[in-house]
Image (cartoon, rainbow, N blue to C red):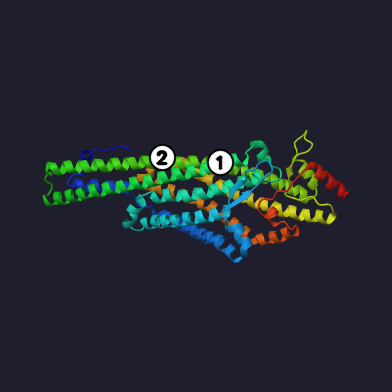
Amino acid sequence: MKIVPLQELLQRSPPNTNPFQFVHDLIARVLLPRTPNCAAPALVFFGIVYGANILVCLAILIIPLHRGPTSRKKYQSPWQVHHIPESTTPYYIPNSGLCMAVFQLITCVISEIYVAMMYYSAKSQSFQRATYALVWVEIRWLPMYLGVWATAWASFAFCLCTSERTLYRSLHLNPLVFNSLCFLFATALFTLAVYYTVRQLTLLTSSYAQHDIFFKNLHLAIDQWNRTRGKPLPEPTLINLERTYESFVNSVRVSMAHTRSTILFWTICAIPIFLVYAVSVWAFLTLVRGCTDVATGKISVLDHCKAVIEPGTKDQDISSDLDVKCNNTDQITLSGMGNYLKRKYIYLATQSSCLSLCLCFHIAVGIFRLAAGDKVIYDGNVRAAVALLNFGGSCFIFLAMTIQCYHMVTDKKGERKSEILANEERVINYPIQVSSVKEKKKKKNCAS
């Protein structure tokens, strides 16, 4: 941000015009631009989206309370623990639905306030100063990213615990390493986000204080120039005015530099989360294809399990979402359960895709904001466009939360199906069945 000396600004004033009033209007127009009136309809739309998202989040939090202890345990427990035979350390998996509902509820409430400020700034001068602060934008990133990361964490862990275990065999992420990486990323994200947010608040508060001091002295200079009918102001008054002007401009410059660093921070944070979602979506689609082959009879459950075994091995543990039974009736049941699991994986893949698109959108907006530079602050049209683009990611989150709510409401059908196998936890949460190849061969002989 280039600093223009105060004397140069005063010399730019037109003839027969109060130069101090000219400087006042110029700075107010640059630092406090009004939101364009054309943005009002878009702000109303995003206000409705955030309001609908608030209702969906409340539904996700309230509905399980009226479904008994089993539903409350499944949807209200903050953590789930999952053990695998290869390790004595379990996977610690956050409840993605609960985390997303809580964090997105906070995000949507803050965003509604910011949308209201943007809307009224297009209608009233009194709201210009409120929208000048980008503090609302910075605060809402923290709960939003924590919720999105919790869902990415849970989705990736689910893929590590599924039948084909493609991710587990490829990445060799044992529970200790996986838990450490996830907790470390969440801790770093929270710590750095708090630092950037608190520092942004501090710098904006300092800018406001310097703004008030400078404009107070500027108003005194305007009144004195009007009273003396254009006579030069005393030198001490001019020196004091120049000093407060330099302090004000320096505080604004530091605040804008930190804002740029904050934008860069959130853009970089979105990249690894997006990659986690991309890998999870690929794994979910692989599982959908496997369950489709089993449900349609293209391959048997035993062949589906054998496909997991690496060539050259004779006896090792494998995991399967479906039990291999020894009669035709159970085979029919397995076909129905294959369809159920296919729908479950499609739901998870769709939800993860929506959130990955949201992150991709935020990455693109972050790059645009960095390219726009200082225009994000002093150009009203650019600032309004960036704000509207930031709100655009709420549409993808609303779709993901709606899918989560719909799955929760209709999940009782899946619970009834799972009761047929008398193993609800295995099918509904993180289904795993461990057995050996020899046991599979015995069951195949029994079926024949």
Q: Secondary structure at mark 1?
A: helix
In front of the other: 353 or 58: 58
Alpha carbon distance from label 2 to label 1: 27 Å
Closer to us: mark 2 or mark 1?
1
Task: Tell me the residue that label 2 is attached to.
Answer: 261
Q: Local crowd at mark 2 within 10 Å, few (<14), some, or many (≥20)?
A: some
- Quarter in which the N terminus is drawn: top left
Judged left or right of residue 306, residue 86 is left
Q: Position of residue 350 (x, y in %)?
A: 62, 50
**Amino acid at dot 2:** Ser
Q: Residue at left 70%, top 54%?
A: 427
> Given the image, on which type of amino acid does mark 1 rest?
Ser
Query: Relative to the observer, which residue lies in front, 311 or 423?
Result: 423
Q: How many marks?
A: 2
Query: Which quadrant of the figure has residue 371?
Result: top left
Q: Residue drawn 52% across and 50% down? A: 147
Q: Position of residue 162 (x, y in %)?
A: 68, 46
Which mark is on residue 180?
Answer: 1
Observer-nearest of 74 and 63: 74
